[in-house]
Amino acid sequence: MIGKKWLTACGIVVFWLISMMCQAVSIIYDNTWRDAYGQVLERTVFSLDECTGHDDYIMELFTDTDVTAMEAYDIQATVLQKNTRYSYYWYPHYMATVVLAVSDDCPYDITGWHSLQTLPVTVCILSSQPQYSFSVQAMSYGLGRDVSGQLAVQALKKIHEEGRFQLDTLTGFNIMQPYRNRPAAQVYVLYDYQARQWQRRGAPIHIVVPDEGTLAFQKGLLSKIPLVVDDARLADCLADAAYRTEPMEGAVQISDQESFFVSADLISHQMLFHVFHVYEKNVLTGTNNMLWYMAALFVTILWGCRLRRHVIQPRMRNAYAGLTLVLCGWVLLRMYKLMLPGYAVDLIRWSWYSYYLFFGLLVSLIVWIGYMASQPDWHPECPPWLRLLFSYNLVLAVLVCTNDIHQWAFILPDIAGDANSYHGNGPLYYLLAVSYGAEFLVVNFWLCYASWKQHVQRSFRLILPFLCCLFYGGYIVGYLMKIPFCRISELVLTTVVWTLIWLEVVMRIRIIPTNEGYIEFFRQSRLAIQLCDDSGRVAYASRDINNLPLEDMEIQTMPIRGGWVRWYRDVRHLRQQKRNLSLVAQALERSYHLLRREEEIQRQVIHQEVSRRIYAELEQVISSKRERIAAYMKALQSMKPGIKADAIVSHLNVMVCYLKKRCILLLRGKEKGILEVRELSLAVSESQHYMTVAGLRGMATVRLSGTIPDKTALFLYDMFEEIGEASIAHHEPYWICHFSETGRAWTLSVMLEDRPEGSDWLPKALAGSTLPEPLIYDRLEYGRRLTVSIGKESYHD
């Protein structure tokens, strides 16, 4: 039973070992110098799936990704194993001893660390971490058995001040010269295996182990899982690749690894501040460059906002805002470059290239401002040729930023660290300088010509923009020719200041539309006005405001942003006008009352006159019918009822209807002097009814429209009544009456039946003036016709 359990346990162990051996392994290693160690791992590690070289962030990739193992120092392995909750496996492979790689051309006998201090040799340390810090600590150990690095920092400070210290960013390889076998310095501080590998590539160097002592570090693989390695083959491959498994003679290993690791973190900061002097003082003023640029940043913001506030055109205000942002961005980039450590030569060089991107944006914005200022349009559009020019400027700037590829702008030396100070100018640089300078000159000429043409400015001040251009151009030429005064100055700071000065000049001489000078204009104005702040203090006041007669002034105020405005208005003339208007109003009121009284009196007079006329006309009408009515009434008194009595009553009804309707028409037309045709039609219709009863049958039609003068209506109605009564008296059986209107007259036409001439009473009645005179008698084939007309012209007259 026990044997079966042991067999089961052994099977599980074997299965686990097999599974571990079959598990895929991913390894990352440091390939800053070469890929030799990676090639050794590929030949000796079982189940290796991927082996990748990296020159930075190896620790971060190992802890944050699925990488199985990484190349590490024994110090790093110890710290990780003690300070993390994960289990790591350490596989030491080879030793790395800090040595001196001395060039065979070096004329001095280099024996150790003190030789670097005392002899005039150039020294180079590799900038890759953590080798950079460990090399400084090894030097400090040799100088005084101190691994904090302070002794080495002091020594390197002296070497750097003498101009003998360099940093190599990519060690034996360089980004500008991928393969280099000749050492750039006389002494390199390297690991022993790096020096041997360099020797194998043909570099003329020899290895020196410092007499004062040095440090050795064990390197190998730190893994998250157990690894299966061919140890025998590993030893052979390491030896073939110039790696040693034992430290060199005179080298020691660190015992207190955690303290050593903490001190290593401080090395880069000590070198940054004590050796490289990141916060370097300006040569001209002796003041810290960072302080100058911090002040320049605030001045640029305030000055740019002030200039933008004075610009009138909306799009130009946006251009001023963009120009201010470009200047601020340029200053910030310069501050970033000043903060970079001396060994970050790539970042220093790339930030230096980026200056020209801001230069291109700056020149493009100045051209855009000049174009807008010279155009009469308030919102000018960007023409295609100007967009092409902007693209050309940016292409030049981008080509400068990619100078590492082609070196058309700057011809760089072999050593990357010397590129910022020792370089030549290529054709692209001169093309860029000539293009930007020509554009700036054209903008100045364009603005001055537009100002002269528009009669804005014709004085000697037009040469001020050209003077700014001349001074700045002379400064650039001096900078290129390396004149000491120009060369030691700050190019970015000078460019920013001269740009702001140029913008101020073109605004002051008013070749760019601005609202500058409004304060003086306000003060010279005769408008009685004051601008006050929130406390009531008068900030600006117009001329002669203190000599105003306040008794004749009206004071008004209105709040504005930051205070309020108060203005005085001379109301003497208004008060005089008010008094005059008051007198005129009183006179008009009296006139109004008099006119109302006069109108009332006139209405009374008209009413009385109309009443008198009505009474007179009524009296006249009644008097004309009085005798006939009296005769009819007398005949009725002695007459017995019968046909004759009915005939007399019918005649009386016709006359009574006539009198009633005559009075109604008279009253209707007394106010306006006109009558509606409807009133005349009703009167004629009612009279026709009683005439029909009296024996005169027929019809009466009124073909009039609208209104008719009252006198015309009364006359036509009188004629209708007279003819009707005469026809009844002569026993006419039938008639047709027709009221019509033409463009020239109103007409009454009466048609009676035909009679022999002997029995026709009409000629006798007309001859005897029994009927009115205006009647016209016509004898027609089918009857007799009486016509009366009243002309419209005579009526109007």
Image (cartoon, grey):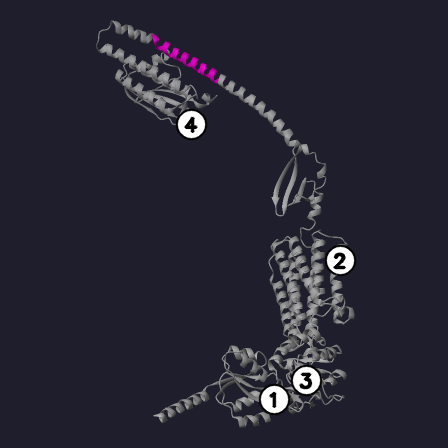
What residue does disc 3 label?
A: 189
The disc placed on residue 743 is 4
Whether residue 347 sits left or right of residue 733 in the image: it is right
SS label for mark 2: helix
The residue that appears at 66% across and 31% down in the rendered structure is 572
Q: Residues within 10 Å of mark 3 (few under 14, many from 20)?
A: many
Mark closer to the chain start, 3 or 4: 3
Q: Tell me, for residue 95, which label it has, or none.
A: 1
* Dot in front, 2 or 3: 3
Label 4, label 2: how far apart the Cα atoms are: 87 Å
Secondary structure under tag 3 reads strand
Identify which residue, 596 or 415, lies in the foreground. 415
Q: Looking at the image, can residue 117 be seen?
A: yes
Say which quarter of the image contains residue 543: top right
Residue 577 image position (x, y, % from top left):
63, 29
How many numbered circles are shown? Answer: 4
| Neighbours of disc 4 within 10 Å: few (<14), some (14-19), many (20+) | few
- Would residue 425 be seen by someone viewing this image from the given angle? no
- CB atoms of marks 1 and 4 within 8 Å: no
